[in-house]
Image (tube, grey):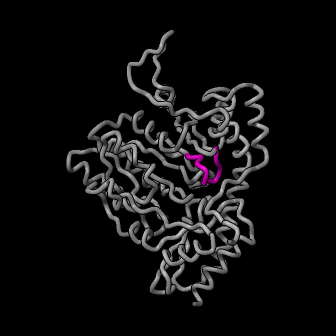
Amino acid sequence: MAERIFLSAPHLTGGEMGYIQQAFDDNWIGPLGPHVEAFEAQLVDIVGKKRAVALSSGTSAIHLALRTLGVERGDLVLASSFTFVGSVAPLRDMGAEPWFVDSNEETWNMDPELLADAVDQAVAQGRKPKAAIVVDIVGQCADYDPILEICNAAGIPIIEDAAEALGATYKGHPAGSFGKVSILSFNGNKILTTSTGGAFLSDEDDLVDEAFFLATQARDPAPHYEHSTTGYNYRMSSLLAAFGRAQLESLEERVEIRRAIFERYEAALGGLAGISFMPEAGFGRSNRWLTALTIDPAEFGRSASDVMGVLAEHNIESRPVWKPMHMQPVFAGAPRTGGAVSERLFAQGLCLPSGSALRPDQQDRVIELVAELALA
């Protein structure tokens, strides 16, 4: 069996064990302490928000964002349809209702024109949305100038889901800096990892204070355990934060490596009939978290699913792009605006191995197999 090539394997810097050993030496291994605080401070410096709370996952950060913004059962929340389920799963648990908004072809992110239509339709129905979850998809920021104009005019706070986009920029500003609340993810396949983890970021002290309170089991100030509301065990371990501190030190290098991997794929495969790579919007820089492309089977002669199957036969991991949320059984019947773009991207989309630890010879194997299929 040929060597396994993963889609986006964790990339270790070599400095992780030093920070982890320091946590052991100091006996700070719980969910609080100097490593967590230092990790949060690094995130604040990179993203440009005032404060951060390191958490157990990006999904927990979405949940806390919704709670701190006052979303309750029956409330309507606008959301990108073309995303991973973690962006919107907490809505179902909270009893809130998503209204999904399609992407545009230029960015693969939420279409501002469709967002404006969705806001108008919802308000006309007497259901002003309580918030909007805008996702920075596959490493690229959404088009925030028009999105912010639309939402600010309607009084709708934005939750920026930058889980896939740390290190990306929009008009010179970092991903994660645009939401009233922004969230990050440090899952094992992200551009940097704490094995599992996430973060809640905001400029508003009251929101950050409430997020911290809820993430630490909502314990009221008292000598005993007093609870006036329910909270969660969502805080990040000090060991994981120590690991993340080393990872953050190489963020820019990781972005450059992933961008170079994308460019090499595009140079080798972009001229093949039927293959189109995810465009980079002129307003910013993608971190190219994953190299994503579409395959038109009528032109290429094989479908994206066919290509994924052949790669799997050679022990190479690839995957489809996200199945839109409006197509997911769990959200059947949810209102939506548009849908054709994200449906096409799902039908034709494919993500190739893209991790910053990917070797050139491994990438050559992927390129050769895809190119051979085009000639078959």
Residue 285 seen anywhere in this rendered image of the structure: no
Q: Residue furthest front?
A: 1
Q: Residue furthest top?
A: 223
The spot of residue 145 in percent (x, y) is 47, 53
Between residues 42 and 34, which one lies in front from this camera angle?
34
Q: Residue at x 73, y 43 (%)?
A: 246
Q: Residue at x 31, y 36 (%)?
A: 72
Q: Is residue 174 above or below residue 214?
A: below
Q: Residue furthest bottom?
A: 376
Q: Is residue 189 magenta?
A: yes
Q: Position of 141 compared to 148: left or right?
A: right
Q: Residue at x 55, y 40 (%)?
A: 199
* Residues in magenta, as a range: 185-194
The total of numbered circles placed on residues is: 0
- The kind of secondary structure the magenta stretch mainly shows is loop
Q: Is residue 26 above or below residue 177?
A: above
Between residues 322 and 305, which one lies in front from this camera angle?
305
Q: Position of 209 compared to 342: left or right?
A: right
The spot of residue 345 in percent (x, y) is 44, 69
Between residues 303 and 207, which one lies in front from this camera angle?
303
